Structures are given as C-alpha cells and as structure tokens.
Amino acid sequence: MAFYRPAPYQKPVAIAVLLAMLALPSVLTAFGQEFYIGFATRVLIFALAASSLNLVLGFGGMFSLGHAAFFGVGAYAAATCLNSGIGDALLAFPLAMLAAGLFALVVGAISLRTRGVYFIMITLAFAQMAYYLFISARVWGGDDGLSLASRMTLGGFSLSSDSALYFVALACLALSIVFLGRLADARFGRVIQAIRENETRMEALGYPVFRYRLICFALGGALAGLAGALLANLTGLASPNLLQWTQSGTLLVMVIIGGVGYLYGGVVGALVLLCLEEVLAGFTLHWHIALGLLLLGIVLFAPKGVAALFGKRHG
Amino acid sequence: MTQLFLEQALNGLQFGLMLFLLAAGLTLVFGIMDCINLAHGSLYMVGAYLVAAAAQAADSFWIGLGAGVAGAAVLGLLLELSLFRQLYKRDHLSQVLATFALILIANEAVRIIWGAQPVMLNPPEALSGPVEIGNFFYPAYRLVIIGFGLAVAGLLYLLVAKSRVGMWVRAGASNREMTEALGINVQALFTAVFVFGTALCALAGGLLGPLLAVQVGMGESVLILAFVVIIIGGIGSIRGALVGSLIVGSVDTLGRALLPTLLRALLPADAASTLGPALASILIYLLMAGILFFKPQGLFPARA
C-alpha cells in the first residue's frame, strides 16, 4: 500500500455530493418520503463510525475487531449526559467523544502490546467485556439499555425534527472527513501510514511507534464515540446491542466493502451495506443469507473491495 | 459453603473441559494455518442442531451424538475443500470477512430449517438423575461430560505429543514453511486438522445441548470465550488451550457463584449487589488483560 493521496477529481465530486446531501431533506419532503430522512441519517452516522474504523484499520494498519465498543460508549455517554441535565450537544458530544476516546486509550494501551491475530482477538475480547459490563450494570439499564427522554439541543436549537438531526449528522461527517483527509496528509498521518508499511524501520528511525499507534487508536475511538452519540439521539436509546461484537463485524464489513485505506471507504461501505440491507429486507425475510453469500462473493472475486472494482488504486 | 464450593468447582471443571474441545480445534486452525475462523462458533451451533435432530430421529442420545458429530465432520470437510483452502493464503481481513459471512449464512440457515425457537435435547434417561458422592449430590450427566472431556483431552495429548501426525501438527504450528520443505503434505494435514476441529466442536455442542438451550446465536458467545482461552494459552498450543480452558472455566463459574457472596462480606449490601454481577461477568477479561500485560504471547507460546 502506498501513502494516501486524493485523486484529482475527488474534491469536486465530494463538494457536489455534499451539496446534493444538503438538498436531500427538502427533496424527500417534497415527494412525501420523510421516512427516508431517518434512514439517510442512519447512513451518515454509520458512515462516520466506519470512517473512524478506517482511520485505525486503513491508515493505522491496526486490525481492531472491537470498534463497536467505542461506538456504544459514546451512545451511553450521550444518554447519561442528557439524563443528568447536560442537554446541549455542544457540551454532550465532546464529552461523549472524551469518554470513548479515554476508553480507547486504555484498551489500546494494553492491546497494542500484542501483534497480529492476538491484537484482533484482544480488541474483540475487550469489546465483549464492555458489552457485559453494560448489560449487567443496573445504573445503565441492563439489558434494556438507557433511553433518552428527548433529543438534545444544539446551542438552543432543538434537534427534535428529523431534518435538524440529519443536518447535524451531515455536518459531523463532513467535518470528520475533512479532518481525516488533512490528518492523512499531515506529518502524523504520514508517520502512521509509514508504521503500517514498515514498523521496524520506523522504530529504527527513532519514531515512538507505540505512542503514534495509541494516539491513532484513541482518535478513532473518539470519532466512533461521536457517531454513537448521534445514533443515541436518532434512536432515542443507548442499547447494549450497539456494543455487540457483530456490530464491530458490521463496521469492519463496511470498511472492507468500501475500500480499506481510502478516505471515503467508510462512507461508501456504509452506504452500500445499509442500502443492500434495506433492499434485500424488502425482498425476503431471510435477507441475512443473501447478504452472507454476497460477502462471500466479494471475498472470493473482488478481494480488494468494491472500490477496487471500479478503478485502480490512486496513490 | 464447602458443598457449594465443591459443586461449583466441578461445574467449572466441566465447563472448562467443554471449552477445551472448542479451543483445541480453534487454536490449531489459528496456529498452523494462520487463519482466523470466526465461524468456529457456528460449527458448534450446527453440530448441536445436528445432534439434536439425529437424537430425535433415532430416539437415542448416543446414536444422535455419533451421527451428529459425523455429520458435522462431513460439513467441515466440504467447507475446508470449498472455502477455507482458498482463505489460508489470504490476509486476515479477507478471512474475517468470509467467516463473518459464514456466520450470517449459518444462523439464517438454521433459523429456516429448525425455526427460531430453541430445540430440546434430552440427556439419556439413565443419566438424568443425580449421583451421590459421599454426602453430596451431583448430576450424573455432568459427571459423564467431565469424563468425556478428560478422555478427549488425554487422547488429544497422546495424539499431539506422541504420534507422528501430532509431530507434524506441532511442526506446522511452529514453522509452516520448514515443515513443507521437509516433505510433509501440509495441505492434507490442514484438511485433517480442520475436520478434526469441527468434529470436536460438534461434540462439545452435542454434549452441552441438554444443559444449555440449542438455539440460534449459541455459538457466538462461546466463540469469544474460546478466543479468550487461546489468547491466554498461546495460539497454536494444545497445552495452552487446556490450561487456558480450565482457568477460564473455573474462574468464570466460581466468580459468578462466589463473588457476590464475597463482596457482600466486604462491602455494604447495596454496593455489593450492584458491583457483584458486573464484576463477575468481566472477571475473565480482566484476567486475560492481566496475563497479556505480562506475557503478550500467552502462557505457552507455540512460536518462540
């Protein structure tokens, strides 16, 4: 893999898509399809979560199978904030990111001591630990999860309408993508990608490999926490299911489908997977089988992800 | 108190031995083939369903167990030949994606064939009662499971430590290329190990069937425990899998049974009842984190 470098057409396309996304709620409303505003918000939120995993996996080269834990911690942190009187997203979202980021820091500090298969499995085990912790702790509602009395406000504006939340999610995703793109191109991003390519060499050059990895891991966790806080607002619930390991698997599938190490890999993957689910679920009750067969097909016939089917890797 | 402790210690031993059946196959697939198999838990689930179905058809638990394990082994063989063989040389990402897809397919297929309701699997009639050991009663069926687990563990030890095939397996786990260079047919060895691992986890599924519900998703929770076992034990090491299984099985069982009581003695009742179940459910993960902190390669690393 080479260093990430955006294709020349990437920026104009991204701006055009962003403009279309801005117009989407009014278009959907004009056609009487308001239901799909909620669905679009879900896609945006999962795009953010998958992008945060892509930072860790694609740029950092750390194969984490426990990313949903940070997603879930963000959701629980947002719900806890709201229920204890911090109802403004301007304060609650950063707090959720802080909680998820700190948790990722602790998990990373232990997990990053291991390599390869061990790393995959220890991140999985830590996520499972968080899952059981939330299920068995009564303060967080146990199996039922923690429900939110209402949606948050943002600087005094209520997010109770679906399109308001949609725009907030869109802003969070757009800002995160800009941030990730700048990060990948900055010194930190270069070092992280170089560590992915050749850890020993970077160690020999005197870079504190462990510290760079850990910061990247915690950053990814914090961004996943933001996505979790958004999702808690959308569904009105912080549920332990968010931390389940199948959720980590789903995020991973999104990144792999979209393209590991591509800036827009997480976004494309979330869009493709969620739309596939929606379409397949309309045809058959047993859509999991169809999805599974499709994934197997992708592994066997398009090993580099959907992005690689449509063009060469730029970089 | 000693009654309770003894009973829970036996339960822990029984749970640990069943975990070992799962972890033994998994650790070899990881260790020798460097292949991540998330679908190992699904094979355990499918095995339990096959045993339940065969036991119902034959009206005998033991015939059902044999037929179910054989059926699962055939399924494992087909899977290895059609899919896993192609996955060994691929990166971990592809392996995780493919086996994740297998989980989706297996869960849904089981739901279509057997329905969403748990399937009943009854222990053999003769073993349904308790046995008296000294002045203490213990379910006969659980004792049989312990016996089965010990027998399989002993057999596996002899097979891996004393036989020629076992030597190949150990050689494959510590250095795959060198083993190949020495003229061992590694591909056939891989197939045999995979099928054997499938049979072992179907055996665990069938034996545990009467104790736990045979239902969709039963494989996933136990899969994570098997992961914890092989992380603690060291990937690719059968000895590590055995030690790890017994540690995880007894710490988990004893923790759940005794920790709330212990905490109640130390803390105010209110705090103890909140903290007890939460701490008990994450105890093995804390243990794993502690072991990895000092030994990142696990207790018995297969590769030096």
Image (cartoon, coloured by chain):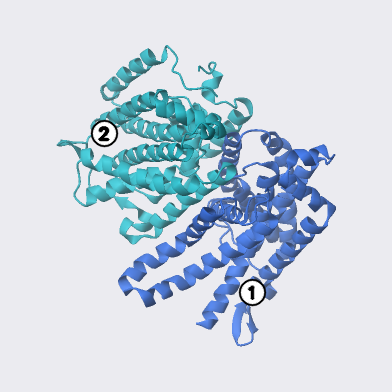
Task: Please state if A257 lies on the left or on the right of A160 as rendered.
Answer: right
| Residue located beneath label 1 in the image | B128
Q: Nearer the viewer, residue B55 or B155?
A: B155
Task: Please state if A89 lies on the left or on the right of A195 as rendered.
Answer: left
Front position among marks 2 and 1: 2
| Chain B: drawing colour | blue
Task: Please state if A90 lies on the left or on the right of A101 as rendered.
Answer: left
| Residue located beneath label 2 in the image | A165
* Outermost residue to the left: A156
Label 2 is found on which chain of the structure?
A: A
Residue A311, placed above or below residue A184: above
| Same chain? Circles 2 and 1 | no
| Chain A: drawing colour | cyan
Tell me the amino acid under the disc marked 1: Ser
Q: Nearer the viewer, residue B107 or B272?
A: B272
Residue A35 appears in view: yes
